[in-house]
Image: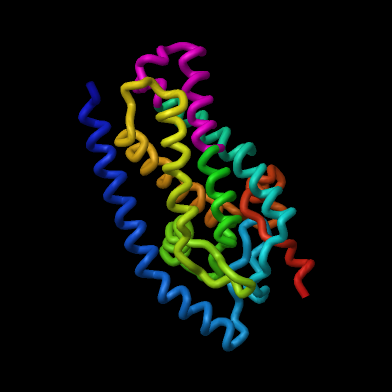
Amino acid sequence: MRHDHNENGAGFAGGLLSLLVIASLGALPALASADSSADSVGSPTAVAAATPAQPELPYTRPTETTKLHNYFFDAFGPYPATGAAIAAGVSQISNSPPEWGQGAKGFGRRFGSSYGIAATSISTRYALAKAFREDTLYYRCDCTGVFPRLGHAVLSTLTSRRGLEGRTVFSLPALVAPYAGTMTAIYGWYPNRFGAKDAFRMGNYNLLFAVAGNISLEFFYGGPHSLLHRMHLNNGHGAPDPGSVR
């Protein structure tokens, strides 16, 4: 029998998800207009998180090598490992699912599950982005102010860049990926009593975790000499080296 707090959490996450989708779709015309205006007057586009903020640089589509580097970092670097440990700790406290028990063995199963969900979600996003010819790397906002930057980070969760000019579009890969990860977990290694409804509920949380990741990339990056950069925590969403742009 499922707990009521799971259903309440699903409703809360689902509500936030709906607002995120609506906001992303509603903001696309404005973003496209801003991109067009920027191109007409030579204004800058956003610079990737792995590089120092240099608004004068135009968008440069990342190479396949850059994408591959980012994929391995996103899927197997410190971000998914840290996120999996936090998720496993929360699940351990709530004893969810109870079939996995407690102790080191229970924590290990929960950690492996969370890590597997993250790796599957990220692999799906990169594979679909390749098929749709989208650039789903995160680019920091060239705007100023907490709320504009926060809005940019949230909207970037469901948008991507397309074409040589890097126009902003709604990203189906970014929307599908979080649910692909949780669906794989539910039908791959979760207890049999879990089903599609649970996969959708968990996918909502997975998507919200992606929002949190973008916010951290937007606000916690301090330049090429910062501690985060030295720990390579920004290389997960890096665009070409600005020095290579001519």
Indicate the colouring scheme: rainbow
Q: Residue placed farthest to the bottom in the image?
A: 41
Residue 153 visible to the viewer: no
Q: Is residue 27 left or right of residue 108?
A: left
Q: In which quadrant will I find the C terminus? A: bottom right
Q: Residue at x 53, y 57 (%)?
A: 218
Q: State which quadrant residue 93 falls in.
A: top left
Q: Is residue 38 visible?
A: yes
Task: Please give left or right for residue 74 compared with residue 199 in the image.
Answer: right
Going 51% across and 25% down the picture, which residue do you hit?
Answer: 111
Q: Position of residue 114 (x, y in %)?
A: 49, 30
Residue 90: x %, y % from top left: 40, 27
Residue 198 sits in which quadrant? top left
Front residue (pair 107, 75):
75
Q: Which residue sits furthest front?
A: 131
* Residue at (40% x, 25% y) in the render: 91
Seen in the picture, residue 141 relative to 15 is either above or below; the reply is: below
In the image, is 135 to the left or to the right of 65?
left
Question: x and y percent of residue 176 in the render?
Answer: 44, 49
Up-down relation of residue 113 to residue 224 (above or below): above
Report how many numbered discs are placed on residues in the image: 0
Task: Residue at the far left: name it.
Answer: 4
Residue at 23% in and 35% down: 7
Residue 15 position in % (x across, y down): 27, 50
Decide whether residue 43 is among the magenta residues: no
> In this picture, which residue range is highlighted in magenta?
91-119
Please say if 192 is above or below 238: above
